[in-house]
Amino acid sequence: MKFCGQRTRLAIVFVAVIGLIGLLYSPPVNASTLDSLLVRQAELRRQAEENRKKLEQKRDEVSDLTGIVSGLDQDINETQTDIANTEAQITVSEQVINELEVDITETQNELNGLEQKLRYAYISLYELSRESPLDTVLASSSLTEMVSQSQYIQSLQTELQGNISKTNAAKAELEGKKNEKLAQKAGLVSLKQD
């Protein structure tokens, strides 16, 4: 398709030059003497040579313009490729941001659940710690019940420590995902501005 356009341009330039030659060099109809015909012939040859040189110059100009147009076409193709790549990067960044938002929501829900467990464990430990050891011994109907109560308190403390660790890890994970989301958004803004 490009080649056809170039051919058309060359044909138009050639026809224009031939038309100019025809207008400029129309022979006179009445030539009276041989000398005037020879002078006229020499003049026409000189004009033909000038026109040939002009034609060569125009061909060179057309060739230069063709090179410029080819360079511009190449630049356009490269720019279109860059745009397509940038659009693909924007799409991927938007997908990453959406996935991070889902992960952040899930982590926040997990964190909320762990914090609720911590509250219940703190409340239970607080209530159990308010009882004196003597009250625990007196309230127990047997030594087994008292040992069970003690083991229950111990398991609550262990669970509380585990939940504290999980909560801290979930908070750190949540913070990391939020930072990653901010970085992705900044990258996305940068891509859209380019």
Image: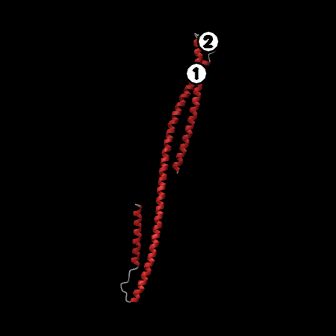
**In what quadrant of the picture does the N terminus appear?**
bottom left
Relative to 57, say whether 86 is above or below. Answer: above
Task: List x then y, in percent, for residue 42.
Answer: 43, 84
Left or right position of 6 against 178: left
Left or right position of 65 against 156: left
How busy is the neighbourhood of tag 2: few (under 14 within 10 Å), some, or many (20 plus)? some
Q: What's the residue at 41%, 71% (across, down)?
A: 14
Q: What's the residue at 41%, 86% (across, down)?
A: 38
Relative to 141, say whether 112 is above or below. Answer: below
Q: What's the residue at 48%, 63% (across, down)?
A: 68
Left or right position of 100 against 132: left
Task: List x then y, in percent, for residue 40.
Answer: 41, 84
State the count of labels. 2
Task: Write down the residue under mark 1.
Answer: 156
Mark number, residue 55: none
Task: Write down the residue under mark 2.
Answer: 137
Q: Quadrant of residue 150?
A: top right
Tag 1: amino acid: Leu
Task: List x then y, in percent, for residue 166.
Answer: 57, 29
How busy is the neighbourhood of tag 1: few (under 14 within 10 Å), some, or many (20 plus)? some
Tag 2: amino acid: Val
Q: What's the residue at 57%, 25% (across, down)?
A: 119
